[in-house]
Amino acid sequence: EYGDPPPPLGSEPRGTIFLNLAWLRTAALALRRLISRGTLARVALAQRLGIPPSAATQRQHGIDCACYYTENLFVRSPVEGHFCFEGRTAFERRERPLLESLSFEARDELLSMLEAEAARRRGIVPAAAARKARVAAEYSPLHPELWTLCERWLHRDFVALVEQARAGELRRPPQLAPGIYTLPVFSELFCRLLTEELAHFGASGLPVGQPNSMNRHGALLDELGLSAGLLDPLLSDWLRPLCAALPPLAAAGGASIDHHKAFVVAYRLGEDESLSMHVDNAEVTLNVN
């Protein structure tokens, strides 16, 4: 499965070192996939036994409050909006005027949609862990270099801004409104390679998680394994110093941000066509267009 082992040291001709490194990379990939299959098996067993995820595991998915499971559940039909949902009985009591304004069919549809969203949230942590383990075990990246952050993935103007922030000499980027800035972040090369990678992943047939409660189509980048080498250092080494140097963002907690939820969304006719009004559950939001 791993290919031929490397020859004894000193016996290889010039250039053989590249073959040896390739063998080691193949072995490392096989080991990673073996570990991922073990993780997948553990997740499946926990689901069958009904073992809830630990608080630490929930925090890794951005869930730091039990209110996540009952507050701000979004539905599009038959009434578009965010609702508190603690079960049918409580909802029928709290939202009686709304329900009485709907037809029987619409009332049942609304309750069914809310129950489905509540169930999705309750199962979101083990489902995400299972998808991530399967992707790690089965997915072969088109551009594996994307999994490691380097400066060529960042726009040169963004690099200059962060360097100024680190030195305490930041010239603030254009501000569209209080606390809302416009600035380049990624290089054109990174954007092109990431777009190609996402298309490649989409064609793989592997399962993909719903980006958030409002967008059904897209991908969660953590499930592709991009957190450790790309997103975590982007947050700690680049975004946090910049946020700390911008007073409105620092005041909102940007100077100490330590968690991210990174995703891409896709809009097309007949699927997700728009995004309703909402408030992000985050100290800082970075939108990349």
Image (spheres, rainbow, N blue to C red):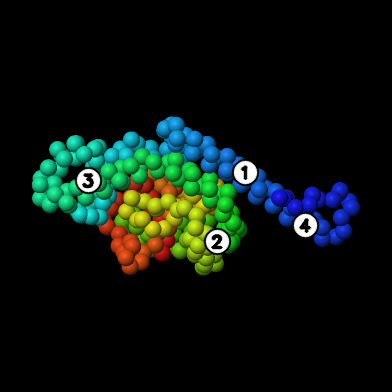
x, y percent for residue 112: 25, 46
Give me the C-alpha separation between circle 3 and circle 1: 42 Å
Give SS at disc 2. Answer: helix
Q: Which residue is mark 3?
A: 111
Which label was assigned to residue 61? none
Q: Are the residues at dot 4 and dot 2 in contact (C-beta closer than 8 Å)?
A: no
Q: Earlier in the sequence, mark 3 or mark 2?
A: 3
When the figure is inspected, residue 126 is found, relative to residue 237, above or below; the finding is above
Q: Residues within 10 Å of mark 3 (few under 14, many from 20)?
A: some
Q: Are the residues at dot 3 and dot 2 in contact (C-beta closer than 8 Å)?
A: no
Q: Which residue is mark 4?
A: 19
Viewer-side residue, 67 vs 5? 5
Q: Earlier in the sequence, mark 4 or mark 3?
A: 4
Q: For residue 236, say whether it is visible.
A: no
- In the picture, measured across the screen, residue 9 lies left or right of residue 84, that is right
The residue under label 2 is which amino acid type?
A: Trp
Q: Are the residues at dot 4 and dot 1 in contact (C-beta closer than 8 Å)?
A: no
Give me the C-alpha separation between circle 4 and circle 3: 60 Å
Which label was assigned to residue 34? 1
x, y percent for residue 34: 62, 43
